[in-house]
Structure formats: C-alpha cells, structure tokens
Image (spheres, rainbow, N blue to C red):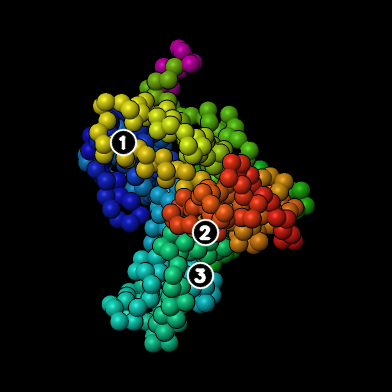
Amino acid sequence: MECFVSQPNSVVLNIEANLKGKGQECMEQVCRRLGIVEQDYYGLLYKGRAGENLWLNLRNRLDRQLVGPPPYRLQLRVKFFIPPHNILQQSTRQQFYDQIRGDINSQKLVAETEEQMIRMLGLIAQAEHGNFDRRTHQMNIYKTMLSDDFEPTPELIHKIVDAHSQLVGLSKESAQYQLLQEASTLPSYGVEYHDASYRGEHTHVGIGPTGVFLCDANTELVEKLEYVTITKAEHVGKNCVLKILNDNGSERDIMLRLNTQSAANALYRCITEMHSFFCCDTVHNEVSTQFSRDLKGTLASLFNEKTTLGRDYVFDVKRTSREAHDHARRLLYQPVPLVGTTEKSLISEKESHDCDSPTLSVEEKCQVLEETLEKIEDSLTCCVCRDAEISAALCPCGHLTCIDCAKKITDCPLCRKQIETVQRIFLPTIQCKGASCASISLKTGTQSPGHRHCHKRKREVYFDSIDAPES
C-alpha cells in the first residue's frame, strides 16, 4: 500500500506500508527516512469521513482507520510540543521549526506584542536567508513573511529589516532555536484546537500542556481549565463531558458537543494523552489498556473474554515527557570510547562490523569514522545553545553546558534540578613537544593556548568556581 506523508515544510515522502499492519510501522519508516530518534513527539494526521483531522492510532491496524482507496495521504506533525531546550536532535528541531513557522504564517500562533512578532520574523529571515545584505534580493522577502492580517507598511518593513540586521553572524541552527524559545513563551504554544459547541455557542476547545482552553468564535479566551481541576473525562456519542472541581469543593459538568462521533473521540483522546504526557510520571494502565470493540468483536467476547478480535486501543501514548527524553538520550548518547583507542573500537556494536572488515570499502570506512566523530563533537556541544562547546558543570547534578548559558539559567535544562553552584571546567588538552601547551578543538580543528596547569603525560580537568545565578 502506498502512502504519501507530507512534512511541515510541504515535502512529501512516499512510504510503502502494509494495510493490515499497525500505524507504528508507518511511523518508523518515516522517522527512519528523516533520521529521527525522538519519535514520541510526533504523530500522523489523516482526514476522517467528515473531513475532520484525526491522529492515526499507532497501536491499531491501518485498514481500520484510513478511509477511501489508496494512495493514502498522511501528515507528519508535532503532537507534543516540549520545551525547546529538551530537544536533542537537530532533525527534530528542524521539524519543530518548520511547524512553528507555518503556524506563525497561518496565524495559529500569534505574538502577544508587535515587538515580539518583529523579533520572531527577524529570526525567521536569519534562519532561512542568512545574514542581512542590502544588495541582494533579501529586501523583497520581508513583505512575503507577513500574514494577511498585517499590512506591509514601510515602517513595519523597516522594523523587520532592522531586527534582521542585528542578527548578523548568528548560525541557522541558533536562529531556529531562538525562534522556538520565543514561540514557547506564547500561551498558544503546543495547543491543539477542536471545534465544538458549548451551551449552544460555537467554541474553540484548545488542549495544551497545562490544561483545556475554552475560546469563543473569535478565539478569545473564555475559561481555562487546569488539569488538576478536571476529575474525569467521558466520551458519549458525539459528546465529550468534563467533570470540573470548583474552588468550593462542588463539581460541575462541561458538555462539549462535536459534529461527529470520531471528532468527539479525538477530543477525548487528546485531553487524556496531553495530560498523561505532560503531567504524569508514567503512563498508567487505565490509559494504556483502554480499548473498544466493534460488533463482531463484542459478540466474540461473549464466548471468549480475552479475545483480541475487533479490538482497537483508544490511546497510543507510550511514554511521558520525561520518559521520552530519557529514552531518546539512551539511544543517542551511547558510551563513546576515549580518543586514542583502536580504529576497530570506534565502531558501535549496532553496525555489526568494523573498519578492518574486508566487506567495507574505503568510502564506507570514512563514513563510519565521520559518524563516530560527529557523535563525539555533539557530546562536547552545549545542550542549551547547541553552538558553543561545554565549559561549565552545573552542581549538584553535574550536567554540562557552556559558561554563557550556565550564567543565565537557574534550573538544569536536562534534569530540572535547581542549580546551587556553577563550576568552570577545562577539557583535556593535547600538548605538543616543547615548552608551550596548546589545546585542539575537536569541533573547529583550531589550536588555542592551553591551560597553565596542563602536563604532558597527565590529563586533568580543572574547575574554577563561579557563583550560580540566584533562583
């Protein structure tokens, strides 16, 4: 079966999938093509019978979800928008950026102030077109970056040009990361909207990492329901019912009516999965084991209660936000051998071969060594800015960042522990023969003056105590 999977940047992938296979097989093919390890943040969207957007359940068979004749059209989208500093892969960061870029252009993600909008557009221009240059075609691109709700006046264009010109020298990856940081401060970041009817009026129901947002037809916020106040969620036909705990201890019901039963089920599923992913320590059995049956499966269950005939799982969330982050780190950051080991030991066990194998050509040997070197360079890069080398240790957790980022944060970006002190570190150096000592950067390949405590035969890491920022 042929599937066309479109990415947030509108590039389409052609995937061959088994119609009787599960959705997870299709997702794994897409992520393998794109080199994505952090699969837990993504989902595949498809159109229902009434044209509504539905998330493909990765635990169920494709033929029980997709409608119509092949080829089937799916959309790869970010399902769970985590904080940008928790993203580990550049390929994942690129997908986040492409989707945020599209949401800004379509006004799904709106800046709170004009200054913030101008700053975000300047970062987009830097990420997509490089450094500002008045002599090139860049002067014609700023009008196309504005949505239809903004008139491209000369004053507004001049402000965007000024914001872009101040970012000269900023790399594409850093510009994308800073845009995601700006977008993550917006109230609508990571919010998925559903059209429903509440008390007879058209309502936009937004489901986000912190709770449920009830907005009117003009997307103005009417009421926000924190997850801690929602005691129960039910799905009955075309209705999704939320039981809310009031401040005085009483309960009230909020009944949201949707156009179709599948849309109501999608809303119920979105609320439960968002809550499990962002607010729970682990995915509970009540979520992972919940299923429904069709008529044929219901009749079969009367004779065999444990039968899987006609069974469809309701939810497909496998890990919480912290579990997904830890799982991706274990896959990406395997133990790396020290510099100076043999060529054979540099190859990971996953490759099931080494550079001495006669089946590898010279080009393949170089490619394997380049991939290993990239892993080493990535492990020596700051996990916050993804640009500078690590030069500080956060205490007491011991995670590493660059010194500039360490001075700006109060909590560890990896384990979220409060930072008590920051220790300046100096990476092991490589000294040449002679009186002077020099260090070689693995990332840039350039030499820099070595530390005064370095020795020829002994490599040590030295710490200079730096006061941590006040929490």
Of all residues, the one furthest to the bottom in this rendering is: 154
Q: What percent of the width, then of the height, locates residue 232?
A: 62, 41
Q: Residue at x 40, y 69 (%)?
A: 126
- Where disc 2 sits, the SS reads strand
- Disc nearer the start of the sequence (3/2): 3
Q: Residue at x 53, y 52 (%)?
A: 434
Q: What percent of the width, then of the height, locates residue 253?
A: 63, 48
Query: What span is colored magenta in the figure?
Result: 297-306
Q: Is residue 342 left or right of residue 414?
A: left
Q: What percent of the width, then of the height, locates residue 444?
A: 44, 56
- Disc nearer the start of the sequence (3/1): 3
Of all residues, the one furthest to the front in this rendering is: 434
Dot label at residue 365: 1
Can see residue 466? yes
Contact (CB < 8 A) between labels 3 and 2? Answer: no
Can see residue 251? no
- Where disc 1 sits, the SS reads helix
Q: Where is 106 relative to 292, above or below? A: below
Quadrant housing residue 123: bottom left
Count neighbours of disc 1 (C-alpha within 10 A) and say few if under 14, some if 14 to 19, many if 20 or more: some
State which quarter of the image contains the N terminus. Answer: top left
Contact (CB < 8 A) between labels 1 and 2? Answer: no
Residue assigned mark 2 = 448
